[in-house]
Image (cartoon, rainbow, N blue to C red):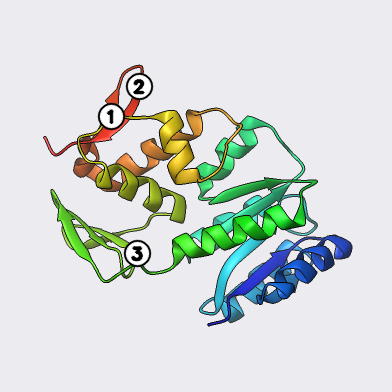
Amino acid sequence: MINNILVVDDESRMRKLIKDFLVAKGYSILEAEDGEKALEIFRQNSSKISLILLDVMMPKLDGWSVLRQIRQESKVPIVMLTARGEEQDELFGFELGVDEYISKPFSPKILVARVEAILKRAEPDENQLKDYGGIEIDKDGRTVKIDGKTVELSLREYELLTYLIENQNIALSRDKILNNVWNYDYYGDSRTIDSHIKKIRHKLGKKGKYIKTIRGVGYKFELK
């Protein structure tokens, strides 16, 4: 199956650079030069788009606004392309449901590697349905349910929750979580994990109590 990637950037040279490298790897590319066009293309092709590369600073509608609207409709993986490197911007993006950040300027080869890694993680796993204290995880459909009701998680939130669950009763440091869930050296503040945990706990409701804070270490999932 060919993965379709929506590339959203107001700079035509940037879109061409990204497109050339991704097409060489067998990906199909859709392009948008501003936020309004991105939403139009996404809604016309939402069932076919596997991932979105989304610039932050754009005319008509910026990346944050596009992100908010797409997250109301879809859990498609979204990678923000940004010239901003400020920690607060990244934390804000993760709160809105960003799966990954790539700061400009970037190596096209690194971008391709990140895209491949995210798409691989987003692929349905072996058919597996398991229940953890009322948290039902379907790895085949990559869904989480609480008492039969689907919980909407971003890709990163889903990966973080399943990582904690798969390491049940083990205290996991923030560094270990970053290395295993983010899957690369993250140079920002580890508070991005705290931000994700807070959102996951909120979405799990009463089941959020299973994610324990281990003072001075990190977190662990424990059914007690």
- Label 1–label 2 contact, CB within 8 A: yes
**What residue sits right under mark 3 in the picture?**
142
Q: Position of residue 178 (x, y in %)?
A: 47, 37
At 31% from the left and 30% from the top, the residue drawn is 219
Could you tell me the amino acid type at mark 1?
Answer: Ala
* Distance (Cα) linking label 1 and label 2: 7 Å
Q: Mark 3, residues whose alpha carbon is within 10 Å: few (<14), some, or many (≥20)?
A: some
Position of 220 with respect to 198 (left or right) is: left
Mark 3 or mark 2, earlier in chain: 3
Q: Is residue 109 above or below residue 200?
A: below
**What residue sits right under mark 1 in the picture?**
171
Q: How many marks?
A: 3
**What residue sits right under mark 2 in the picture?**
217
Q: Is residue 158 above or below residue 47?
A: above
Could you tell me the amino acid type at mark 2?
Answer: Val
Q: Which mark is residue 150?
A: none
